[in-house]
Amino acid sequence: MERPKVLVTRRWPAEVERALQARFDVTLNASDRPLGAAELARAMDEYDVLCPTVSDRIDAEVIGAGGRVRLFANYGVGFDHIDLAAAKARGIAVTNTPGVLTDATADIALTLLLMAARRAGEGERELRDGRWSGWRPTHLVGSALKDKVLGLVGMGRIAIATAQRAHHGFGMKIAYYGRHECDPAVAAELEAEFYPSLHTLLRAADFVSLHVPGGAATANLIDAEALAQMKPGAYLINTARGGIVDHDALAEALDNGRLAGAGLDVYPHEPQVPQALLGLENVVLLPHLGSANAETRVAMGMKALANVEAFARGEALPDRIA
C-alpha cells in the first residue's frame, strides 16, 4: 500500500504528527475535540487506518458502518474502548503501544499514593483558600509508608515498576494478587508475597493499587463487598481503568471513614468524574495523567507509527492484539 489514508482522532505530539505526515496521507484533528459516533462511522469508509485513543468509543455500530478501515492503530496500551470481536469479524487488525508508558504510569501511581497518604491535596486546597492557620502537631496527620503493605491487584509491567519504587524507594512491603505468580526473580527482588485470593490480599494490605485491564471481566471488581474486605484506614489507588471500581461504594467508604483515602487517575465515563467523589476531601483526583510526560507521549506515538508502517508494507504488526 503506497500511501494509506490515516485519520488521527486527537492531537498527538508534533514530532509524531510530522513523522506520520511524511509517510502517509494523514488527516489530523486540528480542533482536538473528541469525535462523535457519526464522525467515527463515516471515517470507517474514508480511511485505511484509524488511530484512536481512549477518548474514542469504537463499538460494533461504528465498526459496522463502513468497510474500508483495515487497522486500528490505538494510541495507548488499554483497548477496552474498542470492540475487538466486531473488529475481528470485519477483518480489522488492532494494535496498541505496550511497554513505553510503564515508568510514567508507575510514577503517577506513586504520586497518588503519596498524595493520599500525606493528605497533600487537602493541604494545598487549604493553603490556596487562605484557611491555613499555621503549623500545629495535629494538623493533617497522614500515614507513613515504611513497612506498610502495598497490595497490587495484577502484577504486570506497571505493577512491577510501581512495586519497585515503593519497595526500594520507600521501604514498603509488597504483596500481590493475580492469575498466576510472577517471575521468581522479580518476587525475590521485591520480597513479594503472592495471594491467590483477591479478598485475602485486600485484608492484608494497607495500600491497594489496581493494575488490571478494563472490560467486562473486571467491571466493578472493587465493589462494596471488596471494599468491605479492606483494612479500616486503608487506601485505594487506581491508575488502570475507571470501570474496575464501583465509585458510589468507594465514596461511601471514604465518607464514613472506613477508608482513610484514595487516589484516582481514571474514571468510568471520562471526562465525567463521579459526582459522589467531588465533594470528598480524602480522595485525590487527577485527570488521567498516567502517561503524561513528553518522552512517553512521543514514544507512544512512535509505537503507533511503527504499526502503521508495518501495515503499509504488508508486514507482521509488532504490537498486534487482535
Image (cartoon, rainbow, N blue to C red):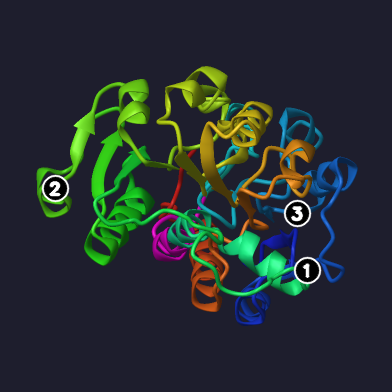
Q: Position of residue 156 (x, y in %)?
A: 33, 45
- Residue ID at (83%, 41%): 41
Q: Nearer the viewer, residue 302 or 212?
A: 212
39 left or right of 316 in image:
right
5 left or right of 220 in image:
right
> In the rendered image, which residue does mark 3 sit on?
47
Which residue in the rendered view is the most extreme toward the top?
A: 225
How far separated are the C-alphas under marks 3 and 2?
Answer: 50 Å
Question: In the structure shown, which secondary structural element does the residue marked by tag 1 occupy?
Answer: loop
- Residue ID at (73%, 47%): 56
What's the mark number on residue 191?
2
How far separated are the C-alphas under marks 1 and 2?
Answer: 47 Å
Question: In the structure shown, which secondary structural element does the residue marked by tag 3 occupy?
Answer: loop
Disc nearer the start of the sequence (3/1): 1
Task: Identify residue type, mark 3.
Answer: Tyr
Task: Identify residue type, mark 2.
Answer: Glu
Magenta span includes 98: yes
**Can you say whether 192 is above or below 9 in the image?**
above
Per the rendered image, the range of residues in magenta is 96-108
Mark 1: give few (<14), some (14-19) or many (20+) Cα within 10 Å.
Answer: some
User: In front of the other: label 1 or label 2?
Assistant: 2
Q: Nearer the viewer, residue 77 or 127?
A: 127
> In the rendered image, which residue does mark 1 sit on?
28
Mark 2: give few (<14), some (14-19) or many (20+) Cα within 10 Å.
Answer: some
Q: Nearer the viewer, residue 262 or 54?
A: 262
Q: Position of residue 7 (x, y in %)?
A: 74, 60
- Which quadrant of the rendered structure holds the N terminus? bottom right
